[in-house]
């Protein structure tokens, strides 16, 4: 089988006051701009949370430096690429002489990047992140998987700032050890206030969908929740994924809504029995 070598727990860490909107397929995400300019799908969006330096032509690659570092830490890499890719080197707000922006910075950068990629019509850019930039890259991949072409992370944990040992991140790997499916789960009360677990970042590599990878990753999520006492498992489901979740025992609750960046959603949930 080409695609699924294993489904692995890649990290179990975390607490973090659960970002009350941590992904672009979140209901509340539409409202958590922290004053950022609303998304306008036109070229020229000027992000507040980073400065960009663009050079070269070809496949877009976005470089995100680590905490306190200027974009110039990637100078050698960009020189090595010799203009054969379109390099977008970021320097984050508050570092290297850039004007600070309202915290939290990582969230602002992630949201700005979604808008930046769309407004500059970047076709599935590769995201290269170092340290905190790597965390932002993971976060972007988990929340806007359809927007990016891949992630290269240098010296970063998959869940920086997320220290709850019950939070878990799962990945399915193919035989070449490429990640082809993801999910994460953490304790978080449902939108109607019931204690439970929140599922996020469910995604399968587009050309490998419909082969059971999503179901295999979800099975590990169920097992994780079950081992920790079970309970309510809920998510903000994209409407196109509703059938997938229904097949996995989820039911809808409430009315659908439209996230301006990524489309229609509905809350879905199910119970997981303890083991
Ligand atoms: C939703 C998503 C994660 C499902 O992942 P997936 O790997 O395709 O999931 P599966 O393969 O387990 O199941 C998908 C479908 O394939 C079918 N399927 C599974 N194995 C199959 C097989 N061997 N042969 C034929 N069909 C199969 C399943 O019955 C299922 O059908 P349904 O969704 O119409 O009920 C994936 O479509 C995705 O990444 N979508 C974009 C991001 C997204 O919407 N994520 C959810 C955010 S809430």
Image: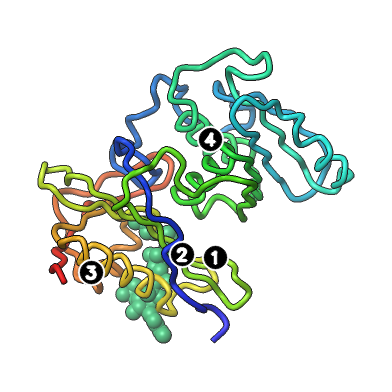
Is residue 204 or residue 40 the one in the foreground? 204
**Quarter of the displayed picture in which ligand 1 can be seen:** bottom left
Residue occupied by mark 2: 171
- For label 4, the SS is helix
Q: Residue, x 79% and y 49% (percent of image)?
A: 58
User: Is the C-beta of the residue carrying label 4 under 8 Å from the nearest atom of ligand 1?
Assistant: no
Q: Quadrant of the N terminus?
A: bottom right
**Number of residues whose C-alpha sits closer than 10 Å to that of mark 1, classed few (under 14), some (14–19) or many (20 or more):** many
For the residues marked 2 and 3, what is the alpha-carbon distance in whole angstroms? 21 Å
Query: Which numbered marker is on residue 213?
Result: none
In the picture shown, does residue 257 fall above or below 175?
Answer: above
First in sequence: mark 4 vs mark 3:
4
Residue under the point 44% across and 48% down:
143
Is the C-beta separation of discs 1 and 2 under 8 Å? yes
What residue did someone put label 3 on? Answer: 246
**From mark 1 to mark 2, how far is it between C-alphas?**
6 Å
Mark 2 secondary-structure assignment: strand
- The residue positioned 63% from the left and 74% from the top of the image is 176
N-terminal-most mark, 1 or 2: 2
Quarter holding the C terminus is bottom left
Compared across the picture, whether 96 is left or right of 210 comes to right
């Amino acid at each position: 089988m080409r695609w699924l070598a294993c489904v692995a727990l890649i990290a179990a860490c975390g607490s973090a006051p659960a970002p009350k909107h941590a992904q672009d397929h979140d209901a509340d995400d539409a409202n958590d701009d922290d004053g950022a300019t609303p998304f306008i799908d036109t070229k020229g969006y000027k992000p507040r949370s980073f400065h960009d330096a663009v050079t070269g032509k070809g496949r877009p690659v976005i470089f995100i430096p680590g905490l306190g570092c200027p974009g110039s830490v990637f100078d050698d890499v960009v020189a090595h690429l010799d203009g054969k890719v379109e390099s977008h080197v970021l320097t984050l707000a508050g570092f290297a002489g850039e004007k600070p922006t309202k915290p939290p910075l990582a969230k602002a950068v992630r949201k700005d990047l979604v808008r930046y990629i769309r407004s500059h019509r970047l076709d599935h850019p590769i995201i290269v992140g170092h340290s905190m930039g790597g965390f932002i890259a993971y976060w972007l991949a988990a929340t806007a998987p359809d927007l990016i072409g891949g992630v290269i992370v240098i010296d970063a944990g998959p869940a920086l700032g997320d220290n709850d040992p019950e939070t878990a991140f799962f990945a399915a790997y193919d035989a070449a050890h490429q990640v082809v499916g993801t999910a994460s789960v953490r304790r978080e009360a449902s939108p109607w206030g019931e204690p439970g677990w929140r599922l996020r970042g469910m995604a399968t590599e587009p050309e490998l969908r419909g082969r059971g990878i999503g179901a295999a990753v979800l099975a590990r999520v169920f097992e994780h929740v079950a081992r920790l006492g079970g309970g309510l498992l809920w998510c903000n489901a994209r409407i196109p994924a509703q059938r997938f979740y229904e097949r996995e025992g989820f039911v809808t609750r409430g009315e659908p809504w439209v996230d301006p960046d990524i489309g229609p959603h509905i809350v879905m949930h199910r119970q997981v029995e303890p083991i």
